[in-house]
Image (cartoon, rainbow, N blue to C red):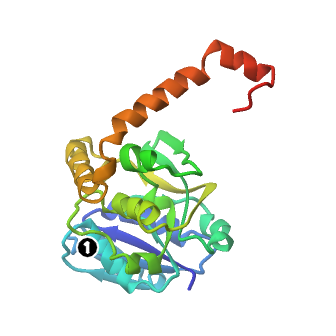
């Protein structure tokens, strides 16, 4: 089995329905689908039971949080690559068929996504081909719902850190690329629609999220934690330099090519 798609859900029946529809609507069916529900009481379990003919594995039981649920999915999965699609998120139409032949060799293969702020406000977000430490440690993360991760590397490096409530997927990407030297590849292709109304996108949680990120840097990358301000200063100066009038003139004359 090449691919396992894992959906975690807790009391989000409406979002789960959207996710199921996008998964079941894929023209390519050659993947395993797993649903991990946290013992919801809003009708989610009944919705899962109505669709067991299209779900390879499911469970509805209490868990210890988002990453505990994801780890349950990892342990149950049989696919070489895993894609985590939370309830409320959706796959781009026919994207599985487009991606299947590209799932090989690399430990992490990530595409782009559409951020869904509302039905009338959907914005594509593109990710870089080259992931720098500054980008991943201090600025952003990789798009979890648009990333295909080899199951073996998750098992090898200890699954998702369940002591973290909000940033364990970010920590995994950071460790995988800069500590364990995992290979990665960016595809210029939108994979998913990311629901921006979820737990991690709630602005009320951003302070807590930042504290967790700082904890990860302090514990695992303390030699780098003071470099952010210096790096930002360098990038600001480079930006002014690249946008200066003389540099633009030299570019037009084809003397400079950066």
Task: Report which quarter residue 245 is drawn in.
Answer: top right
Nearer to us in this view, 162 or 216: 216
Residue at numbered disc 1: 68
When the figure is inspected, residue 106 is found, relative to residue 112, above or below; the finding is below
Rendered location of residue 80, percent (x, y): 52, 81
> With 235 as the anchor, is 48 left or right in this view?
left
In the picture, residue 145 is in which quadrant? bottom left
Q: If the image is split into quadrants, where does the C terminus sit?
A: top right
Quarter that holds the N terminus: bottom right
Indicate the position of residue 193 as horizontal and vertical percent values: 49, 54
From the top left corner, tell me how far across and down residue 246 is, in percent.
67, 14
Q: Is residue 46 visible?
A: no
Residue occupying the point 57% across, 58% down: 92
Query: Measuring 47% from the left and 26% from the top, which residue is drawn there?
Result: 236
Say left or right for 140 vs 9: right
Q: Is residue 123 left or right of residue 158?
A: right
Q: Residue at x 34, y 75 (%)?
A: 159
């Amino acid at each position: 089995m090449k691919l396992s798609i894992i959906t975690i859900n807790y009391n989000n029946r409406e979002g789960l329905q959207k996710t199921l529809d996008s998964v079941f609507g894929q023209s390519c069916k050659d993947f395993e689908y797993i649903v991990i529900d946290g013992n919801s009481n809003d009708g989610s379990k009944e919705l899962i039971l109505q669709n067991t003919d299209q779900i390879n594995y499911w469970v509805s039981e209490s868990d210890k949080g988002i990453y505990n649920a994801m780890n349950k999915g990892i342990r149950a999965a049989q696919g070489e690559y895993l894609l985590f699609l939370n309830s409320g998120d959706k796959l781009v139409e026919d994207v599985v068929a487009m991606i299947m032949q590209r799932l090989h060799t690399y430990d992490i293969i990530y595409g782009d996504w559409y951020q869904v702020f509302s039905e009338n406000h959907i914005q594509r977000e593109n990710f870089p081909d080259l992931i720098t430490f500054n980008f991943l440690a201090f600025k952003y993360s990789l798009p979890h719902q648009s990333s295909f991760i080899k199951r073996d590397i998750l098992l090898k490096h200890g699954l998702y850190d369940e002591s973290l409530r909000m940033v364990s997927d970010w920590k995994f990407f950071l460790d995988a690329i800069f500590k364990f030297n995992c290979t990665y590849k960016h595809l210029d292709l939108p994979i998913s629609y990311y629901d921006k109304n979820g737990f991690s996108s709630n602005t009320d949680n951003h302070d807590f999220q930042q504290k967790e990120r700082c904890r990860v840097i302090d514990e695992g990358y303390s030699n780098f934690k003071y470099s952010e301000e210096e790096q930002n200063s360098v990038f600001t100066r480079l930006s002014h330099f690249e946008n200066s009038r003389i540099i633009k003139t030299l570019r037009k004359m084809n003397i400079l090519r950066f």
